[in-house]
Amino acid sequence: MSTKSSFEARSGHGKLTPQSRAALETAFQEHVRFNEPLAPYVAYGIGGPADVLVFPRNGEDLQMLAQICREYDLPVTIIGTGTNLLVLDAGIRGVVIALKHSFNQIEEISKDAEGMTVRCGAGVSKPELLEWAISRGYAGLEFSSGVPGTLGGGIFMNAGTKYGCYADILTRLELFDFEKGLRQLERKDLYFGYREQTAVGDSLVTSMDFRLKNGDAVALRTEVQRIIQERAEKQPLDFPSCGSTFKNPPTGMSAGRLIEHAGLKGSTSGGAEISLKHANFFLNKGGARASDILALIDLVKKTVFEKFQVQLECEVIILGDRGSL
């Protein structure tokens, strides 16, 4: 039994066989790995192996991968760079896609007196695009200062801060559907909410367009540094984590405050700890397993509900095989 998530890009019940392995090796050569531990590919540094880990380089690779997975009925899961993922200790069955070192183009596609539109690949990192924009004097991405991960994951989660989110500047989205291929969507056809969207579903984000406004490069860099410093003062950045573990509930009190008032700051399970600096950050203090993080998640959900009648919802995405739990 597997955790269900839209990061599972294609459902399937087939298992890796000598035939499917040979097909993947022939198609992807050095860009495919088998029984590959996923801990090095996710921010938590936690996670069991993927049956298959593929690094597609372009749309043609995605087409080949989709054909092989359909032929052998293999499930597909997307991890990007794993900044908001908890991979379970038993790992992930089927094919896992990582966008490391691919889909990383940044291209200015139109410009006028007020600003410009930039087209970005889903594998571009958030800090990379922010630096690209402010070095050219374009405003609109300051909200992402200090936020890690790729743009594809940023769109999937509608990542943001109190200063804004990606939906605020998005104008076009390109997706790869593992059954139907590429499709284009305009902003007017997309719904985004707090850390959610309904557009991506079980597709893979491949590229997006953002509308940026003219700004002053010096002033923008000053603002970016201010926001980064603000984050460093409030958030624990010395140990691996996935940032906020829970979404803020619509109750007026943040998830972190609820966890703190429940008396759970500093709680531990194995190598995992609820941060003393920010209670919504769960840390890998060394040697933590996914089961340790899950134990803290369950503790927080139960305690916060008992004390405040608030049902917290995870922001971290949990992926993998629950068969051993």
Image (tube, rainbow, N blue to C red):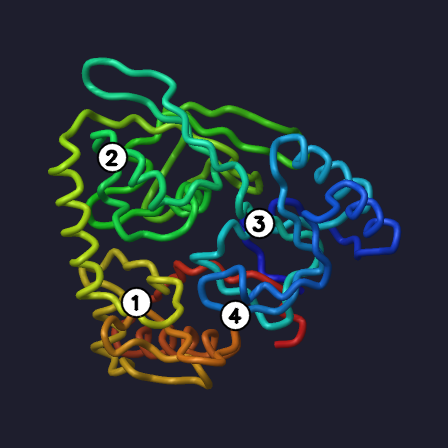
Q: Earlier in the sequence, mark 2 or mark 4?
A: 4
* Residue beneath disc 4: 46
Which circle, 2 or 4, is nearer the viewer? 2
Classed neighbour count for the residue bearing mark 4: other residues with Cα under 10 Å, few (<14), some (14–19), many (≥20): many
Residue 114 placed where, x, y %? 19, 18
Amino acid type at mark 3: Ala
In this orientation, does residue 187 appear?
no
Please state if 116 lies on the left or on the right of 14 as rendered.
left
C-alpha distance separating marks 1 and 3: 24 Å
Closer to the N terminus: mark 1 or mark 2? 2
- Residues at circles 3 and 2 in contact by the CB criterion of under 8 Å: no
Find the residue positioned furthest to the right: 19
The first of marks 1 and 3 along the sequence is 3
Mark toward the start of the polypeptide (3 vs 4): 4
- The residues bearing labels 3 and 2 have C-alpha atoms spaced at a distance of 28 Å
Q: Nearer the viewer, mark 3 or mark 2?
A: 2
Going 22% across and 42% down the picture, which residue do you hit? 142
Circle 2: residue type: Ser
Q: Which residue is mark 2?
A: 135
Asked where in the image residue 83 lies, by quadrant, the reply is bottom left
Given this view, does label 1 or label 2 mark the residue nearer the observer?
2
Residue where numbered disc 3 is placed: 98
Q: Which SS class for mark 1?
A: loop
Q: Residue at x 29, y 83 (%)?
A: 266
Q: Residues within 10 Å of mark 1 (few under 14, many from 20)?
A: some
Work out how far the residue at label 3 is from the one at label 4, CA to CA, in angstroms.
16 Å
Residue picked out by circle 1: 237
Q: Marks 2/4: CA distance? A: 35 Å
Q: Mark 4 vs mark 1: which is more N-terminal? A: 4
User: Which residue occupies 77% across, 40% down?
Assistant: 27
